[in-house]
């Protein structure tokens, strides 16, 4: 139904929208400026639009010209608390905020998909739900939108759901990847507080020092992963912050470290959580220390339905060809709250390369980096891909 040429027709207006979003990035669940831009960009299209209550989301339903089921397309809209360090002329005008993950491209692409689908509305055998979501970067905005009814916005539960993510590294411009099964990791965050009793550095035997125990915990957690987790169903435990003490000759009363945990299956997720707590509590007990563990399960594993991933790949190959659309050989260790959608509705998540030409994808700054740059030419590719996924999925349902 659609070709990449259809996207090129919209490239200029979608690029302008992306640049406007990039200049005014917003964080978390409350994105009033972003929401206003999206509503303005959708104005005039034959859409049934609702805005969120617990968050500044936009849900739009496009009714097809023929009866059929509903398909959902999603774009996340929030930015990151990052100070931009790029040389693009449309750089963020808000200090300490940046669209460093490419969500501005996702939003513009979904607007483009809405326009393309509206042009062919009479040919659609069913409805398309457009999910413009705040709060992907840690706030679980997808779950809140599900609670507010986005999956049933067309009047019945969507039969399939699709989303994509642009990549500032690894993939060349316009390349498209997906895979069946796990495509992104579950993400947990852990804060461990170890408490003993403080004292003078010259007399450690009169104190209960939390620092050596914390160091032992960090190294033991790495051993737990390498010796307790199947190498073909991996896990990552990274301790990214340690805080303890105020002077070299003072033994502190307590110390804290923070970790992120990434896993790719339910079984390994449970094993790593259980092992994390067992290791930390065991070492604390051995040192006669008290330990508190705040273990937070943030996002589950993002799992593509096997049939929907195969369909998504066929659709991508039809647009970009076998050389530029392919299955990823392994999952990525990032996490995504689109996982909550895929837990409810079969669907697929895809990646689209957005590395500017002339930059080596292997060394380009990654998503979330202050120097991350995304090529605008990924927007029309993404818009057509989303539109084609929806249109073809409805077509296949009607066949």
Image (cartoon, rainbow, N blue to C red):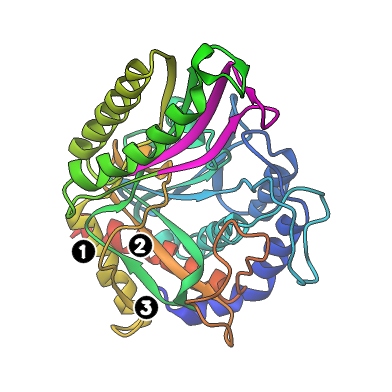
Examine the residues drawn in magenta and state their main secondary structure.
Answer: strand
- Which corner quadrant holds the N terminus? bottom left
Q: 69 left or right of 140?
A: left
User: Circle 3 sits on which residue?
Assistant: 319
| Residue 343 percent coordinates (x, y) | 29, 37
Q: Tell me: residue 10, above or below residue 21.
A: below
First-in-chain label (3 vs 2): 3
Total number of numbered discs in the rendering:
3
Mark 2 vs mark 1: give the one in front: 1
Measure how far apart labels 1 and 3 are at the Cα level. 14 Å
Label 1–label 3 contact, CB within 8 A = no
User: Circle 2 sits on which residue?
Assistant: 389
The magenta stretch is 238-262
Residue 58 seen in the current view: yes
Q: Nearer the viewer, residue 52 or 92?
A: 92
Measure how far apart labels 2 and 1 are at the Cα level. 12 Å
What residue sits 25% from the left and 68% below the top? 329
What residue sits 82% from the left and 49% below the top? 95
What residue sits 17% from the left and 55% below the top? 232
Looking at the image, which residue sits at the far bottom?
358
Q: Secondary structure at mark 3?
A: helix
Measure how far apart labels 3 and 2 are at the Cα level. 11 Å
Q: Dot 2: few (<14), some (14–19), or many (≥20) neighbours within 10 Å?
A: many
Q: Nearer the viewer, residue 48 or 197?
A: 197
**Residue 65 forms part of the magenta stretch:** no
């Amino acid at each position: 139904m659609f070709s990449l040429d259809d996207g090129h027709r919209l490239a200029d207006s979608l690029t302008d929208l992306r640049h406007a979003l990039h200049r005014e990035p917003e964080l978390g669940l409350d994105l009033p400026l972003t929401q206003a831009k999206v509503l303005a960009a959708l104005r005039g299209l034959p859409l049934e639009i609702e805005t969120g209550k617990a968050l500044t989301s936009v849900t739009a339903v496009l009714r097809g010209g023929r009866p059929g089921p509903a398909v959902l397309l999603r774009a996340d809209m929030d930015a990151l608390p990052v100070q931009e360090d790029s040389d693009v002329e449309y750089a963020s005008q808000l200090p300490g905020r940046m669209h460093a993950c490419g969500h501005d491209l996702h939003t513009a692409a979904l607007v483009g998909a809405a326009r393309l689908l509206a042009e062919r509305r009479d040919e659609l055998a069913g409805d398309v739900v457009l999910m413009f979501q705040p709060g992907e970067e840690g706030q679980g905005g997808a779950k809140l939108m599900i609670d507010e009814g986005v999956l049933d916005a067309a009047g019945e539960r969507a039969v399939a759901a699709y989303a994509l993510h642009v990549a500032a590294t690894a993939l060349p411009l316009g390349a498209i990847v997906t895979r069946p099964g796990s495509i992104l990791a579950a993400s947990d965050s852990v804060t461990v507080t170890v408490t003993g009793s403080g004292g003078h550095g010259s007399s450690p035997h009169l104190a209960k020092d939390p620092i050596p125990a914390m160091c032992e915990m960090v190294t033991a957690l790495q051993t737990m992963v390498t010796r307790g987790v199947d190498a073909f169903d991996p896990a990552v435990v990274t301790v990214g912050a340690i805080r303890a003490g105020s002077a070299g000759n003072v033994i502190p009363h307590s110390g804290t470290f923070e970790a992120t945990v990434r896993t790719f299956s339910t079984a390994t997720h449970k094993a790593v959580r259980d092992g994390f707590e067992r290791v930390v509590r065991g070492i604390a007990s051995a040192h006669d220390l008290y330990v508190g563990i705040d273990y937070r399960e943030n996002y589950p594993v993002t799992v593509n339905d096997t049939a929907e991933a195969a369909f998504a790949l066929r659709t991508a190959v039809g647009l970009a060809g076998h050389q530029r659309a392919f299955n990823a050989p392994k999952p990525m260790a990032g996490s995504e709250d689109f996982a909550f959608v895929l837990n409810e509705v079969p669907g697929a998540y895809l990646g689209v390369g957005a590395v500017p030409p002339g930059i080596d994808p292997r060394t380009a700054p990654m998503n979330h980096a202050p120097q991350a740059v995304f090529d605008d030419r990924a927007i029309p590719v993404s818009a057509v891909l989303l539109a084609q996924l929806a249109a073809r999925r409805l077509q296949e349902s009607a066949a």
